[in-house]
Amino acid sequence: MKIVTVIGARPQFIKAAVVSRAIKQHSDVEEIIVHTGQHFDANMSDVFFEQMDIPKPDYQLEIASLSHGAMTGRMLEQIEEVLLKEQPDWVLVYGDTNSTLAGALAASKIHIKVAHVEAGLRSFNMRMPEEQNRILTDKLSKILFCPTQSAKQNLLKEGYIDDANYLPVVGDVMFDAAKFYARRSQKPLELPSTIQSGRFVLGTIHRAENTNDLSRLRSLVASLNKICQSEPVVVPLHPRTKAILTANDIEVDFTTLEPVGYLEMVYLLQHCSLVVSDSGGVQKEAYFFEKPCLVTRDETEWVELVEHGSNHLVGVEKNKILAAYDKAKSTDVDYSVPFYGNGHCAEEIINYLLKG
């Protein structure tokens, strides 16, 4: 069996590392990796391949820094060329990026089976490019690997057929990654020595809805500036976010780092006291590492964590963030509930592909 894996963004590198490791256990399965180049910064791309032992991509498309339409279109064209040459049995796509949709479209149009890892997630906000990408990719896929029961329920409500070979709930590959790489975590070299384990807040700011809207961005930064009067705040800063802050003279009082690799991010998650994030993946990783998380968005795909009380959906309003911060610091949460499987999601994915 031959699988073409299409990846292009940081979270996909992490997920692909887990599944690629499982593929290696099958001598009769060949994997061809296509890196679209959607994340082009070396700190946000190359370091993941080095740290996580991901096989070197067979194809580097280097498509980045374009509008959504132009980026997706060029990816579609070049991925199709790869698929016509390789003639795989499956195209494996992850998540909700332009790379995901382009891979699924290219495969579907030439009748190659598509498997979507992390299917069924919904924010119910069609203004989000990610929501558009994930819905369309689900429609094009032969197997929809659901990370949670709530993801499967979303698909059933949309009219998908309740078939274990079509909508399997396999768990979350990010949980596999967290378990495997936790013992290999690395302290970021930039982290000041004055910041002590268990005594800092970890933040991320990268979602377009927060960075493109200056009023939202200013409110979010002001909230983190206020929190850091109580304890240090550490934010690995996306290059695009950094440029917007600089261009608009938005001052930060918290500690910023250059983008970190996954092993450094795992260290920060292991050693922080609380997480403030607009990242979909980090919301879950906070739960994996038993840390409360303030979700600085107006909606989330990971509704089970909000319902459980480990995550708090706070948006960007300063008073709401600060109130949730105080509440989260004093609330006990049961982190043993297995929302995301047993840590063997990747093996299940490969077994389904072999059957299909």
Image (spheres, helix red, strand yellow):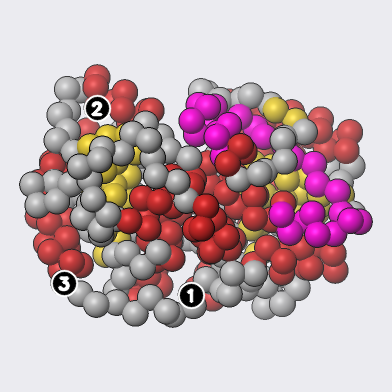
x, y percent for residue 301: 43, 61
- Asked whether residue 136 is drawn in magenta, I would say no
Residue span colored magenta: 21-48
| Quadrant into which the N terminus falls | bottom right
Examine the structure image and report whether residue 34 is included in the region drawn in magenta.
Answer: yes
Pick the front one: 124 or 83:
83
In this figure, which residue is indicated by the disc labeled 1? 339
Q: Secondary structure at mark 3?
A: loop
Residues at discs 1 and 3 in contact (Cβ within 8 Å) = no
Q: Which residue is labeled 2 in the image? A: 245
Q: Which residue is mark 3?
A: 330
Q: Mark 1: which amino acid?
A: Phe
- Evaluate whether residue 108 shows in this view: no
Chain-order first, disc 2 or disc 1: 2
| Drawn side of residue 7 relative to residue 242, left or right | right
Vertical comparison of 234 with 59: above or below = below
Sequence-wise first label, 3 or 2: 2
Q: Nearer the viewer, residue 44 or 209?
A: 44
